[in-house]
Image (cartoon, helix red, strand yellow):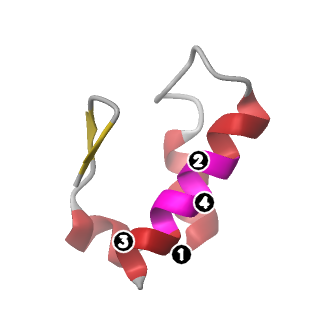
Amino acid sequence: MKVDGVTFVETAVKAMTKEEFINAHIKIVWKELKETDRKKKLSELYDTITK
């Protein structure tokens, strides 16, 4: 799944917990956003992929 120029491998995301996913990506993607906004976006993305 590609979101705002970043590609996420759905099978890899599904193999992680939400906390692992957020921690793995929060310092890497969408650095122009505040950390709280990145966390919210990653959380919503994780929910979308794993549902």
Which of labels 1 and 2 is toward the front?
2
Secondary structure beneath label 2: helix
Q: CA distance from mark 3 to mark 4?
A: 10 Å
The amino acid type of the residue labelled 2 equals: Lys
Q: CA distance from mark 4 to mark 1?
A: 11 Å
- The residue that mark 3 highlights is 49
Q: Which residues are magenta?
A: 40-46
Q: CA distance from mark 1 to mark 2?
A: 15 Å
Residue 32: image x %, image y %? Answer: 58, 14
- As drawn, the label of residue 43 is 4
Are the residues tagged 3 and 4 within 8 Å (C-beta)?
no
Residue at the spot 43% in from the left edge and 71% down from the top edge? 48
- As drawn, the label of residue 41 is 2
**Seen in the image, is 49 located left or right of residue 33?**
left
The amino acid type of the residue labelled 4 equals: Ser
How many C-alpha atoms fall within 10 Å of the one at disc 4: few (<14), some, or many (≥20)? some
Magenta span: chief secondary structure: helix
Q: Is residue 42 magenta?
A: yes
Secondary structure beneath label 1: loop
Q: Is residue 39 above or below residue 27?
A: below
Secondary structure beneath label 4: helix
Are the residues tagged 1 and 3 within 8 Å (C-beta)?
no
Residue 49: image x %, image y %? Answer: 36, 71
**Seen in the image, is 19 located left or right of residue 24?**
right
Quadrant in which residue 43 is drawn: bottom right
